Structure formats: structure tokens, C-alpha cells
Image (cartoon, rainbow, N blue to C red):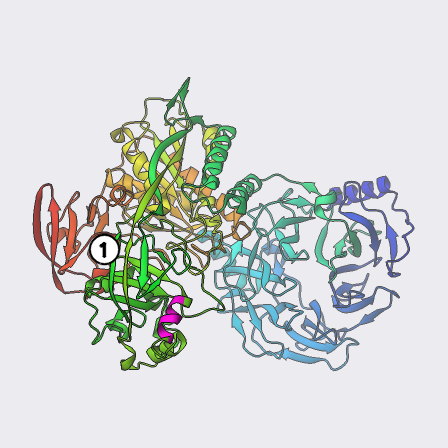
Amino acid sequence: MRCALLVVVLACLLAGCQRVEAPAGDGFHAGRVVAPLPGEGCFARLRQLTFGGDNAEAYWAADGRRLVFQATWQGGGCDQIYTLDLATGARRLVSTGSGRTTCSYFFDHDRHILFASTHAAAPDCPEPPDPSHGYVWPLYPSYDLYRAEVDGSHLTPWIALPGYTAEATTCRQDDRILFTQVADGDIDLYVAEADGSRVRRITATPGYDGGAFFSDDCGQIVWRASRFKEPAKLADFRALLARDLVRPSAMDLWVANGEGEGARQITYLPGASFAPSFLPGGRAVIFASNWQDPAGRTFDLYTVAIDGSHLTRVTQGGGFNAFPMFSPDGRWLAFASNRYGRHPHETNLFVAEWRGEAEGGEAIPTPVDPYMADVRWLADPARAGRRVGTAGIEAAADYLARRFAEAGALPAGDPAAGGPSWFQTFEVTVGVRLEKGTRLTAGEERLRPEVDYLPAAFSASGPVAGTVVFGGYGIEAPELHWDDYDGLDVRHKVVLALRDVPAGGNEGVFASPAGRRYSDPRYKAFIAREHGAAALLLVAAEGEGEEALPPLAADAPESEAGIPVLYLSRASAARWLAAQGSDLATLRARVEAGDPPVHGVALPHLDGEVVLARTRATTRNVIGVVPGSDPQAAPLLLGAHYDHLGHGGAGSLAPDRQAIHPGADDNASGSALLIDLIGRLKAAHLRRPVVVAALTGEEIGLAGSSHLARNLPVAAAHLRAMLNFDMVGRLTDNQLTVFGTDSAAELKGVVEAACAGSPLTCQVGGDGFGPSDMTPFYAANLPVLFFTTGPEADYHRPTDTADRVNGAGAIAVAKVAVAVVAALAGDTPLTLQRTGHPLAQRAEGGGYGAYFGIVPDPAALAGDGAIAGVTIAGCRAGSPAQQAGLAKGDVIVALGGHPVANLRDLAFCLRGHQAGEQVAVRYRRGAAELTAEATLGKR
């Protein structure tokens, strides 16, 4: 402590500790103006508010003119609560003067003050902790929360809860109270309404969660937490807690929404970080920490963005600086510090005019900064969603090649003059073009393409001829007791169906994710085809004005629907219906009311033709290598796809919005992680080379990984394993999922050991098949791993933006990945396994219906649809497909009597069957066409 005091004294001498005249206009007269310490460029000026004693935790009134704080005066008892008028300097005691108090806040529009106190249990100060326990904080069970008027009158208990109840903060928008309580053998955060009702626990991980704070809009909270993975540390925590003590030696910061959901750690620093609060706007946090001196007691103020980037030091000079809080207008920062103290251990209150951390703070580089810069660049709207075949993805490929080189990789792509290039180039289908010859007439009316109608990208080319009949929503869903085709004969007719699903009909059964799947226009085309329809027209019944026709864009790699499918303008449908004395709104209402006569409303006879042509473009994998000390050793392969959905389309989970889908988590997060990993692996000096591949075309059927699996820089048999990183930017509750650990007998132990040495908890398991880029490599008999933080609410939506990526969490994932790579770089053999344990499906995009157990060949899916059917890359062990005798290379062409032209046909067929049913499977094996009986399973 003497060293810390000496630093403060020297700083005082250097700064002069003299009074500095304040410019007019701040309106503050409490205390006096003093000089910031050298290097504190964030402060335009600084005012010391108290002089002597121990003053801390000063929090602002909503009017920005008063503070409420706790203080112990020289020779006094223990902390009491005071208010300070910054205009006059007047100080008022709010608490009783008995017991110990802490954590006071204005609330109820500044009419009341909330704080914790022990005075009801005893008027004296509680006993301090036994020093034999080391440096610990007491958690006095006699602490309860009280409210009082601002002058201290009408003091009443706010809520009566057993055990330690303190560390309360308030939401300025609705006066919700967020507080810490010891209950159920843990220390957790709770939130309640202003009147003490609806108390709910919002943290549940063992450890100390406390010191929370709301953002300005109360949409976020930040707090400090101690979490324990090691059994010995957790046991020590619980033993101390049983004595109402806690050891605050290791604490980090967490952020969540206002109800504690989506919790994510934003600092992974040594030492203790505590007393966090938000900067104005809620995009960054200011806090106190000793992370640069974790064994000592020098605490300074720092800021950090809520994605973990831009760590900045605010205060200098050593000593103790803590409890920062911004005024409501963001102009002033109140904090406690022992600078300029006249006595040892003295802590006073200061208020600084804030210039901004970018103006004068000390920027502290961390790996999160370049990582987030890469994510932001890739997910910038200028990249237009990085769809294959666009300028945005081409720019992204060039950017990744440059960043791979800067990180230390060497090129390992296609041959070029002077050696390998960075790129592996190939062709894919990227679009659908409307050809001359496309025409449509309704009776005597000639309809205009792209105005009155537009074919769907998955439409078959061919004649459109037949009488139009209205078919409701075109849905057949027995499990939801809905069938728009019941009693309706559509053979050789054109079905007119509403887009989307019923909004409120049948008691809203279509509101669930399973029900929403029936909005899929490909499913509606499949059902219409199965009922013998000649074509399908889809029309939007909702929206103001004319509904835009969906653009003609290739959204998936599968074959066409088998019948012409066209989107019809609402105006055209309205003209047809008006001639029948009806309209779309009336028909929709009758359908949702379950009115049978609405089915089969006769409309005009159509005659026409759909002529479509698929367009192709070149696209590029970006391939680099981090050389190992032994060039002959079997290399490892790391991959992450960098393409996304462009402006949306069928892969979007916001299908009615034509907007840029930035793809920040999916998968700018994984692409940027490759860059970080290159630097780490280069520094590790591993024996084995590591090939690093940014893969294109994942969203159109694993096109890039399929091409790479067939065209590796080294022979496939010489490759040791493939590690895939897809959606690693939304780490929540420090939970990382690593699939594929069952693909080799040794992988589970390798991954678990790497996770044990990190703050993360890893869920492991699953074979190597799944909806991402490791699948082609597992199909080629290579062990694989799939790192992901899982899908989230923004998956495949325009809201998957860079500002929602958890950069600090991604770097924590990178450290686990490097530990896994280092372990696999040794000589331990990897024993390939085939198991019956599939990967979990992605949110809202997984399978449905009965279980069959095949893994489709992504190379066949990525083609032009020349291969009719579904080519099998593999069958899961023990699956119905394997038991029926199907094998890799077989092509399924029918199931249960229904033709299967593509993967969606197969999925729709399975949707119509239940577990336990026996179905005939027709398939091709070489030149032979065979039939097998399969008993379907349950998902």
C-alpha cells in the first residue's frame, strides 16, 4: 500500500494538486476544480467533490444536478447514504445513521432513493470478516433494501427477502429494480417491478453475479461476475459463501438484455474488473480494473465496446479509481479516487467533463480489434450480402486473400505464374434468366411478364394451360387438421393459391415454427404437382398497395419443381375475381373461417409458356497454408465459408423482405476467425502444415467445400482432419458447441481437454455429417470437427449485423481451436468412425417429418439439376436407409410412391409419413434401378 500511496503523492507533485480555475457555465459549485493527472486526455476538466473519509458509489439523479453516494467520515462509524447538490455543495444524510448501507439510487422520477441497509438488524456496524480468510468481501445477511424520500423521510422496506439483498440499481424508463441476492446456495441477479412484485431470477450459473447496471433505454444490463470451472475453486467459493463471504479476486464483465437473456462475457482479463456502467448510447461500458496489476491494488478506469473491442485506459497515475457513472446527458463522469488524498486510504468523489475515450484515452490493442474490423468489413452493406456471383463476394475474396497474407499464410490455391495463387476457381449456377418465348394469356387478356406475373426461380419450363381454380393457401397439413385440397379436383388445372400461411385460422396453428414451414412455395408446388395440377400461381393477399413480385433469382441448387410455378400480381388476381363477384380479402377470410364452398372458385382459362435458362458464374475459394516444420507431415485443414444470401430469397427466414442480409455471424464471424487463427498458428511453430480455406458457395449447397474436397492441394488420403468454423460470433453463456467429435475415436478427448483449459464450456458429440462445410470431407473419409456458437434469432435475416457479434467470445473460441489444432498436430493417430448420432439441426432450418437417415451428396446438389433424384453421400449407422440396404452413391428417385426429383421433394415426402411406416424406396445404383422397403424412424 505504501508503494501505491507513493505513486499518488508523486502524481500530486507532478500535477501540482493546485486549484484550477473553471471556465464559466458548468453550473457546479460543489468542491473545487483540480487538474487531471498526466495522460488523462479523456477529461476536459476535473472537479473534486469531497475531501476526506471514504466516499464512493456516487450515482446521478435524472436531472443531472445531484448525486447520491455512500460515505464514511474520518473517525466515523460505517457507510451511510448522502445526497450532494452539485450547484450548491449542500450535503444531506438520507439513511438512518445506524448500521451499514450501500448502493443507493434515485428512482421514481427522483422522488425517492433506494438503498441497502443493515440498520434493522442492529444499530452498530456489522462485524468485519475474519482476516484469516484473506481478502474477502462480507455478504451480510442483514442487508435489506429500503426506499426513502430524497430528504430521508418515510423510510420503508422496499422488499422483504431472506439473506443478503443489496447492490440494487434502477431503470430510469420504468423503475424496474435489478439487485443481487444470496439464495439457493448462490449469489445471483434478480429483477422486480418498482413495487417489489414479479421478482424473477435472471442468472443461474454458480458464482458471484453482482454490481449490475441498466443501459439508458434499459434494454441491456451489464454486471461483474466470478465464475468457476475448476472444482477446487468452486468448492472454495461455496465454503466461503456458507460463511457469508466472497473472495473478489477474479471478476469479469457480462452483458445481457434487460431481462438477463443472451448473456455474454465481454472481458477475459486477469484480476478483478468491477463497477461497470454503460456509456451513453449503450454501445460501450466503463469499468474499474486491476488487470494490468492483478496481484496489486492499482485500479484504473477503462472503457470497452460491448463486443469486446476498443479497450481503452481512462485514468492514470496508479492508486484506486473506480465506480464510474455518466450523467444522464453524457457530459460528466462521476467516479471515486484516492488521488490527491490527504490521509492514507482516503477516497474522494470526482466529476470530470468527458471528452471521449477516442479523444484522449490510451488505446490498448487486443486481438478483438482486428477480428471485429474484419467482421465489419465483410458484413458491410457495401458487400451486398456476399452472394455467389456478385461483386460483393468477389471483393470479399480479394480482401480475405490480402488478410491471409498479412496474417502470415502463404498461397496454396490454383497454379499461377511463379507458384500457387490464393484462389481456387470453379463454376456454379448462380441465377435464372427469363427467356424469350415466355408468355401468358388469361382469356382474351395478355399478361405482362415482370408486371402481371413472374415465374419462380424453381419453376419448371413448359406449357401453362388449363382453367384456374382457387385452392386456398395450397396447404395439406393433416397434423394441423388443414387441407386446402379436400374435395378439390385440380387435375390438369392451374391452382391459384395464397402465399404465406393462414394468420389466424384454425386457432393460429400456423404461428409455430412447424406451421410456418408450410409457407414454403416449393412445398406448395410439390403438393400441387402431387394432386395433378398443371401449374401453380401464387398471389399475396396482404400488404398496402401492389405487392412486389419476388425477383427471379436462383435460391437453391436443387432441380426444378416439376410444374410451372408463377407469382401473380394482386391486381391481376383482383381483376379475375371481380368478374366472379369476389375479391382476395373475402376469399382469404372465408378460407381462414374454414368455409368449404370457397374451394374451387372457377377463374379464367390460362394459356402460355414458361421458358427459363440457368446462368453460371465463376466463384473462388481462398486457399492459404501455414507451413509446418515438417513439410511432409499430413496437414490439417481449417475452413469457414464466406458467402451469404445477398438480398435474401428462399434461404432467408425473412422471405418477404428483399433487403441486404449482411451475414455477420453467418459467416463473417468464421471467416474473420481464420485470419486470427493464421497468426496464432504461425506463432505456435507447429510440426504439421495447416491449410486454411475461406470457402464459397456454402449457402447454395456446400459448393466450395465440395469442390475443395475433390481438388485438395494435397491428396485426400494425406490430409489428417478438417476443422470447420461456421457461426462462431454469438457466444452466449460461454457455451461452445463442437460437433463431429464422434467422427474419430480420439477427438472427444482432444476437444474436452482444450475446453477444460478455457473459460468456455463445450457441448461435444455428433458425427461428421451436417448442414455445413465439413460434410464433404467426412463423406471423403476424413475426421472432422464443426465449431459453432449456434444459430440465433437473426439467423438468415437482414438483422444479422456486425454490431451483434460477440468479438470477445469469438477470440475465446479461437483459443480453444488453437489448442485443438496443437493437439492434432502431434502424432496421435485418428481412428475414423461412423456413428448413428447426427448433428443438431439449425434453428428453423432443420428437418421435419419421419426420419430416413441419408446424407445427401452436396456435390450433386450444387450442380444444374441434371441428375434427377437425391444422390447419397452416406447413410447414418443404424438408420432406416442403411437397414434398407442403401449406400453411398445410390440415387433416390421415389419414396412412398412419390417421385423424388430433388432434396426438397424427399423432405416433403418424409413430412407426409410417420415413424414406423413402411415405404417403398426406388433408387438407381449404377445403371440398375432397384426398390427397397424401409421402415421410417422418429427424429
Residue stretch in magenta: 572-578
Q: Mark 1 points at which residue?
A: 562
Direction front: furthest residue: 444
Residue 879 visible, this orientation: yes
Quarter occupied by residue 844: bottom left
Q: Is residue 439 above or below residue 418?
A: below
Q: Would you say the magenta stretch is mainly helix, strand or loop?
A: helix
Q: Quadrant of the C terminus?
A: bottom left
Side of 84 where 508 appears, left or right: left
**Is 611 covered by the magenta stretch?**
no
Residue 939 visible, this orientation: no
Side of 894 where 686 appears, left or right: right
Question: How dense is the environment of label 1, judged by Cα within 10 Å: few (below 14), some, or many (20 and up)?
Answer: many
**Is 576 covered by the magenta stretch?**
yes
Side of 851 where 470 appears, left or right: right
Across and down, in percent, residue 362 comes to 70, 41
Quarter occupied by residue 937: bottom left
Across and down, in percent, residue 204 comes to 48, 64
Q: Is residue 861 above or below residue 448?
A: above
Q: Which of 287 and 810 is in front in this view?
A: 810
Across and down, in percent, residue 317 comes to 76, 42
Q: Nearer the viewer, residue 570 or 283?
A: 570
| x 32%, y 52%: residue | 438
Q: Is residue 537 above or below residue 391?
A: below
Q: Nearer the viewer, residue 110 or 428?
A: 428
Across and down, in percent, residue 855 comes to 23, 49
Quarter occupied by residue 360: top right
Amino acid type at mark 1 = Gly
Q: Nearer the viewer, residue 549 or 823?
A: 549
